[in-house]
Amino acid sequence: LTGGLEAAWSKLKGEEVLTKDNIAEPMRDIRRALLEADVSLPVVRRFVQSVSDQAVGMGVIRGVKPDQQLVKIVHDELVKLMGGEVSELQFAKSGPTVILLAGLQGVGKTTVCAKLACYLKKQGKSCMLIAGDVYRPAAIDQLVILGEQVGVPVYTAGTDVKPADIAKQGLKEAKKNNVDVVIMDTAGRLQIDKGMMDELKDVKKFLNPTEVLLVVDAMTGQEAAALVTTFNVEIGITGAILTKLDGDSRGGAALSVKEVSGKPIKLVGRGERMEDLEPFYPDRMAGRILGMGDVLSFVEKATEVMRQEDAEDLQKKIMSAKFDFNDFLKQTRAVAKMGSMTRVLGMIPGMGKVSPAQIREAEKNLLVMEAMIEVMTPEERERPELLAESPERRKRIAKDSGKTEQQVSALVAQIFQMRVKMKNLMGVMEGGSIPALSG
Ligand code: GDP
Ligand code: MG
């Protein structure tokens, strides 16, 4: 998607104001990019129409170039299309909150059950899972294992009991144990069929759930719109969870959910680990679609991984432009801790898609940097200026670390660039604006 849209903006370079004529070509690019991202056609049509209308009627805004204007309109419209704000999970006023998960087979329902429990546990809520997929014994075992992994009890009744009865018994058990949140896993089919819908309706009747969340694989293409519509009409959903956002997906499904059902995406799954579930931020998703990278998610993740005091310390340093090689090491190690490099690189603005070769390259670079920092004196680590000023020091570091002087110079240049970048990033976090749009 990114490539297509960047081309779209570039076509407006040199223009003074957005007109019906000069937006025609960029709008075609945007349309094509959205269709390539598997957004369904009616959604694309409405989107393009709405953006065009706004763009032409906008006139000249002082200090804002037409291409920036169009980016802003497209961004805001994307955010709107995806629900605008973060949609929080709802909780029952009294008694246990019941969350029913539905969706096709293989989309990640069972995984989401455990991830969601892990997520809610962190918020201090006690959870219980109900194994409702009675068609595959392995599905029950899978949930039991995942439940153990996140330390949450799982109610099972084998494969001979009807899901609606399992729901009823499970809920009774949850009430007895004063559980805050009950999450019920259900069976999926490869395709929507009547049996599945009837079963879900039955289960829903017994559970009277606070949330009915449709789990949607981010890879779902054009058919996402029809899928969401059917589930919403048949059983009535309160929202969706988009899974496998870490994969190769174009994310088109994200744009369809709210548009066709009026129900928001509430959470996203970004990996196979139990911690990989996050709130869905429409503005970040829009930024990501527009190719600005998932800057804020990245920063948030990095902060969470680093110990709190480290983070505060780091923040102070960044603000005062004192970010040094010690922080650099701490940061790169924190980043390494975050798991796969793919994911992290994908979140960095401008990186776009990364190939395995690029990942290996990046990991190699980290090792090279660490080797050079290791042979620095404590004073040099704290004051990168010393290295900027002294070719002799750089020469010594190159010799001691077995790297070239060019590599040392590049590292020194990089830390100064990082100071600038991080300062900008802090500005973004505080002001909540989008880097590409300001100024
Ligand atoms: P279900 O049939 O809907 O219950 O799907 P499962 O929960 O069994 O998941 C199917 C497969 O998708 C499993 O191998 C999961 O590990 C994987 N999976 C689930 N969520 C994610 C995700 O967010 N990212 C990735 N990469 N894999 C996921
Ligand atoms: Mg399952």
Image (spheres, grey):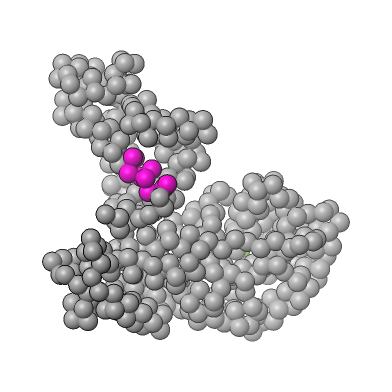
Inspect the magenta stretch and tell me whether residue 316 lies in it. Answer: no
Rendered location of residue 38, percent (x, y): 38, 74
Q: Residue furthest right?
A: 176
Rendered location of residue 173, percent (x, y): 83, 59
Asked whether 273 or 83 is in front, the reply is 83
Taking the spot 76% from the left edge, 62% from the top edge, the residue there is: 93
Q: Establish if 341 lies above or below 416.
A: below
Using the rendered image of the protein, determine whether residue 398 is visible from the camera's viewpoint: no
Work out which quarter of the rendered image holds the N terminus and state it.
bottom left
Asked whether 201 or 19 is in front, the reply is 19
Q: Establish if 208 lies above or below 267.
A: below
Determine whether, in the image, residue 193 is placed left or right of residue 290.
right
Using the rendered image of the protein, determine whether residue 271 is visible from the camera's viewpoint: yes
Rendered location of residue 246, percent (x, y): 44, 56
Q: Which residues are magenta?
A: 422-430
Rendered location of residue 295, percent (x, y): 38, 50
Which quadrant of the figure has residue 159?
A: bottom right
Work out which quarter of the rendered image holds the C terminus and state it.
bottom left
How many marks the image carries: the answer is 0
Q: Establish if 17 lies above or below 245.
A: below
Asked whether 180 or 338 is in front, the reply is 180
Determine whether, in the image, residue 183 is placed left or right of residue 323.
right
Determine whether, in the image, residue 241 is placed left or right of residue 20.
right
